[in-house]
Image: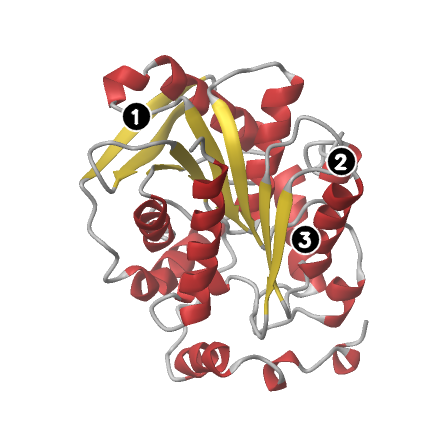
Amino acid sequence: MKTENKIKVLDLISPEMGEVMNFYASLTPAEPSDGSYQAIRKAYNEDRKYWNEHAPNMHRIEDVFIPTTHGEILTRILQPTKKSPATLFYLHGGGFIVGNLDTHDRIMRLLALYTDCTVIGIDYSLSPEAPYPQAIQEISEVCQYFYQNAKQHDVNMNQIGFAGDSAGAMLSLATTLWLRDNQIHCGKISALLLWYGLYGLQDSVSRQLYGGDWDGLSQQDLIDYDNAYLTESGSREAPYYCLFNNDLTQNIPPCFIASAEYDPLLDDSIALYRTFEAHNISHEYKMYSGTLHAFLHYSRMMKTADNAIRDGANYFINCLPQ
């Protein structure tokens, strides 16, 4: 679709989303020094520093390197209290090419605080250096490690969950399917928390109407993210990339599915919740009005972002054994 035909979303976003955009307009943006992935990651890391300030304190914060067949993977254990009813594995977004435990630290801490559960962030390897399905394999192995060594690391692995934003939402569901299909047990998966994920659609109404320079999700941006993640050997039809090509009708944990109103990935979430609805998979779908993709980062300025984290946290708590 020609740019001039797209919906002018910046005229329609909520006042608090507009506040974030105005804040960015007042700054000198952290631009990459060149087009390399290293430079793009450095700029992204700088951009996210402000949004991660003043995060809540935790009872325990510990970084642990976990051995996998792809090498050691950094994880971060966040415990809000001494005893936890469950463990949530958090997978950060960033289009598979950027992001780390620091860029999503505030989100993870708030999630730990609001659930009163342990949150373990997994710093999975980024693409294109680590092509599909390496991240899924790493996450799966990290979960197995903690299940087998729960006492050593003082974590409750009887009840677990996966949570993530954007690419992290896809990885949360993809890892759940991977564990199911390969009959790997690492604790009962009580629920998934999926914020504005991409789940495999290659085109949709929302992808045509939304996305641009304002959110870094133009059609070309989305293609570039896919190409970096899948590389030449990957397929957009692969069942752990296009999750609609996997079996979504059975043995799926309850899912909290959140979307942003003016997100080009909106229809991915709608397609997922309608699939679950048709096959009686337990879920809750919520669309956050007036928001853009990645709004979860902006809880310092947006009450809606804080509410979206709380909504997911409450959903997870309600899925735990009472």
Which mark, residue 155?
A: 1
Image depth: mark 2 or mark 3 in front: 3
Image coordinates for residue 216, horizontal then vertical, percent: 58, 65
Image coordinates for residue 131, horizontal then vertical, percent: 59, 34
User: Does residue 177 appear to the left or right of 111 in the view shown?
Assistant: right
User: Does residue 147 appear to the left or right of 153 in the view shown?
Assistant: right
Q: What is the basis of the colouring in this image? A: secondary structure
Give the residue drawn at x 45%, y 79%. Answer: 16
The CA distance from mark 1 to mark 3 is: 31 Å
Q: Pointer 1: residues within 10 angstroms few (<14), some, or many (20+)?
A: many
Label 3, secondary structure: give it. helix
Which mark, residue 269?
A: 3
Q: Quadrant of the C terminus?
A: top left
Q: What kind of residue is marked 1?
A: Val
Q: Earlier in the sequence, mark 2 or mark 3?
A: 2
Image depth: mark 2 or mark 1 in front: 1
Q: What kind of residue is marked 3?
A: Ser
Q: Earlier in the sequence, mark 2 or mark 1?
A: 1
Label 2: which residue?
235
Depth check: 131 or 86 in front? 86
Which mark, residue 239?
A: none
Q: Pointer 2: residues within 10 angstroms few (<14), some, or many (20+)?
A: some
Depth check: 186 or 245 in front? 186
Depth check: 119 or 310 in front? 310
Q: Is residue 301 above or below residue 190?
A: below
Label 1, secondary structure: give it. loop
